[in-house]
Image (cartoon, rainbow, N blue to C red):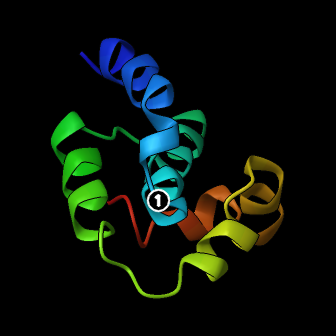
């Protein structure tokens, strides 16, 4: 199901805030690290980040390369257990 939702989320990316896009990028990285991330977890994150106040911080930290530089797969465990 995620394989269907992810392209849809990317197509709708222009409608998402930087923090909502960070949810999808973090989930992608978590899956690369071997964690299972459900569609419901992504949806919850996106909903929770809809009104996040510090969009600038999410924008600054949201690039996939920055996420990988900032967090190791081991460190992701606190988010995706």
| Residue placed furthest toward the front | 15
| Residue shown at 24% from the left, 69% from the top | 48
- Vertical arrangement, residue 52 with respect to residue 16, above or below: below
Q: Which percent across, then down, holds residue 26? A: 53, 52
Quarter of the figure with the C terminus: bottom left
Q: Nearer the viewer, residue 11 or 3?
A: 11
Q: Is residue 26 above or below residue 28?
A: below
**Residue that numbered label 1 is attached to:** 17
How many other residues sit within 10 Å of disc 1, few (<14), some (14-19) or many (≥20)?
A: some
The quadrant in which residue 59 appears is bottom right
27 or 18: nearer the eye? 18
Q: Is residue 68 left or right of residue 38?
A: right
Q: Quadrant of residue 61?
A: bottom right
Q: Secondary structure at mark 1?
A: loop
- Image height of 7 relative to 81, above or below: above
For the point 37% across and 80% down, the residue is 52
Query: Which quadrant is home to the N terminus?
Result: top left
| 51 sits to left or right of 65 | left
């Amino acid at each position: 199901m995620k394989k269907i939702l992810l392209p849809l989320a990317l197509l709708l990316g222009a409608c998402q805030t930087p923090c909502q896009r960070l949810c999808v990028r973090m989930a992608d990285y978590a899956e690369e690290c071997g964690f299972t991330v459900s569609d419901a977890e992504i949806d919850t994150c996106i909903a929770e980040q809809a009104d996040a106040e510090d969009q600038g911080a999410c924008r600054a930290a949201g690039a996939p390369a920055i996420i990988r530089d900032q967090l190791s797969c081991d460190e992701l465990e606190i988010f995706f257990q």
